Amino acid sequence: MACFFLSVYLRPVSAKLLPEGLELQHFIQQETAYRVASAPAFTKLLTFYQLEARYRYSYSLRFTAIGRMSYEPIYDLQNLTVTNPFQDRFASSSPGVVEDASAFDMDFRELYGDLSLENTDLRIGKQIIRWGVIEGFRITDELNPLDFSEFILRELTDRYIPLWMLKIDHYFEKSTLQFVWIPEVVFHKPAAEGTEFEQFQKPPGLERPAKTFAQTEMGIRFSMNLAGFDLAFTYFDGWDDFPTASQTLFGFGGGGLGSNASPRYHRIKTFGLAFTKSLGSELVKGEFAYVDGRAFGTFASATETELVRPQVKYALGWDTRAPLGVETFFQFSQQWIQNHKDEIIADELDSGASVTFRKTLMNERFILKLLAIYIVNDEEFLIRPRVNYRWNDQLMLSFGADIFEGKEGNIQQDDFRFIGFFDKNDRIYTALRYSF
């Protein structure tokens, strides 16, 4: 709270004292969640302060820093068996305390410099690069790994793990060529062991790639407009962000706890295509990717603990406006494992869909939103209603719920359920943001 009062006090002063070319934006946010489905209890009391600083040194040189300081006291205020009473879903070795979840945390979300030349832009530093046009389903968007500390319930930008990268954009007359080099090799981050949204952990003895130039990652993206279509062709040569496992539509695996897991990461090559097409007030979009080198876990009784198979992924989206001015976003995605065998844990064809409804009222001060995700193969839902109310330019209040529907499955028996696993974890939540 000290940061809050200090920022309020300095706000009228800082605008006068800031050096020319420096802009500051900052906010403080408090988030509370309460589990309602089973064993009701508070599960989150997170407060964080975020400062965004942008400095233009010259017309061609700019710097950006986005830092965040957070405080989450939930594990200090109540016993872990209250916050997460469902640890029996995992091995008996699950801890009684969360050792790697500190109450205080401070980090730079992004930290980079931009250099603009005549036909080329360079960005170097810690950053997030998103290639996809289908939000939520990872088809061509595999550059930044994901943080699953709160499953997939955080805001999308908060789920991405920023990486140190070099990004170069070269502009032709009607197209753009982008090159990305990632010297930092980082993988998906699971929720801390024993916490509420623990769903997978890195298997014992997992080997990380050597820190050599040959192990770094790179990507190329060529974008253009053709006959009214915005097209992007992509190529990514890097690491699968999860070791051998049963892949899901959301880009990480469901294995890793059973005896079938192979404790190593695999190099993959992804060839992708993305497009968007405006049709008046509507938008049609899609992505396609061919992944070479992905390894899939097998059942414990199988001769081989993993099988490498090509994978095809694709998704289509349609943004439209329903009656009463309701913005509506439909998405459908599938993943197909070529040369599939019965011993592979993942289904040969995995399908999922989502729909989002959004309605603004009172000159966009009041926003109603409903997101529903459906995993076809396992017949499971995630339903997320949310209400945002903007009191004024600085203060916004939110109230929502996360409702999981489906069978829990049994991870220990390789019966992985992505959403249904959290059937007991339905919750309501509030968020309060004050921007300066």
Image (spheres, rainbow, N blue to C red):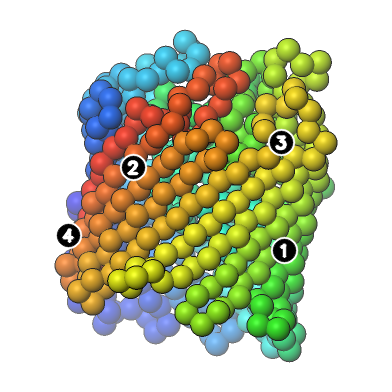
* Amino acid at the residue labelled 2: Asp
Nearest to the eye among marks 4 and 1: give it: 1
- The residue identified by callout 4 is 5
* Amino acid at the residue labelled 3: Glu
Tell me which residue sits at (47%, 36%) in the image.
380
Of residues 325 and 396, the one drawn nearer to the viewer in this rendering: 325
Dot placed on the residue nearer the N-terminal end, 3 or 2: 3
Dot placed on the residue nearer the N-terminal end, 1 or 3: 1
Tell me which residue sits at (40%, 45%) in the image.
153
Residue 59, position in %: x, y? 55, 87
Numbered mark located on residue 402 in the image = 2
Dot placed on the residue nearer the N-terminal end, 3 or 4: 4
Q: Specify whether residue 218 is in view.
A: no
Dot placed on the residue nearer the N-terminal end, 4 or 2: 4
Q: Is residue 420 above or below residue 385?
A: above
- The residue identified by callout 3 is 348
Report how far apart the C-alphas of labels 4 and 1 lie in the structure: 48 Å
* Amino acid at the residue labelled 4: Phe
Report how far apart the C-alphas of labels 3 and 2 lie in the structure: 29 Å
Report how far apart the C-alphas of labels 4 and 2 lie in the structure: 32 Å
Residue 378 lies left or right of residue 294; in this view the side is left
Q: Tell me the crowding category of disc 3: few under 14, some 14 to 19, or many 20 or more residues within 10 angstroms, Cα based.
A: some
Q: Residue furthest top?
A: 92
Residue 162, position in %: x, y? 54, 54
- The residue identified by callout 1 is 273
Of residues 316 and 126, the one drawn nearer to the viewer in this rendering: 316
Report how far apart the C-alphas of labels 1 and 3 lie in the structure: 22 Å
